[in-house]
Amino acid sequence: MNIVRSYNNWRRFRETRNELNRLSHRELADLGISRTDITTIARQATR
């Protein structure tokens, strides 16, 4: 089961990161996020 959980976490990380990367700089600023925060936020989404 650990492999399945790891795969699902990786998929969630990748989807979150990709969705945030699609946002414009203005949209990210409205959310209080900068481009440099995206990877950290995506990692936190997998917890």
Image (cartoon, rainbow, N blue to C red):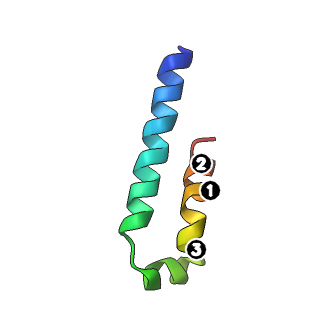
Badges 2 and 3: C-beta atoms under 8 Å apart?
Answer: no
Q: What amino acid is labelled 3 in the image? A: Ile
Badges 1 and 2: C-beta atoms under 8 Å apart?
Answer: yes
The x and y percentages for residue 22 are: 35, 67
Task: Count the numbered circles shown.
Answer: 3
Q: Residues within 10 Å of mark 2 (few under 14, many from 20)?
A: some
Name the residue carrying label 1.
40
The x and y percentages for residue 35 are: 53, 71
Q: Secondary structure at mark 1?
A: helix
Q: Which mark is residue 33?
A: 3
**Structural distance between the alpha carbons of marks 3 and 1:** 11 Å
The x and y percentages for residue 12 are: 46, 42
Residue depicted at 41% across the width and 65% down the height: 21
Q: Which mark is residue 23?
A: none
Marked residue nearer the N-terminal end (3 or 1): 3
**Structural distance between the alpha carbons of marks 1 and 2:** 5 Å
Residue depicted at 46% across the width and 31% down the height: 8
Q: What amino acid is labelled 1 in the image? A: Thr
**Relative vertical location of residue 29 with respect to residue 43 in this rendering, above or below:** below
Q: What amino acid is labelled 2 in the image? A: Arg
Name the residue carrying label 2.
43
**Relative vertical location of residue 23 with respect to residue 39 in this rendering, above or below:** below
Residue depicted at 49% across the width and 45% down the height: 13
**Relative vertical location of residue 34 with respect to residue 21 in this rendering, above or below:** below
Q: Choose between 7 and 30: the one closer to the eye.
A: 7
The x and y percentages for residue 30 are: 52, 83
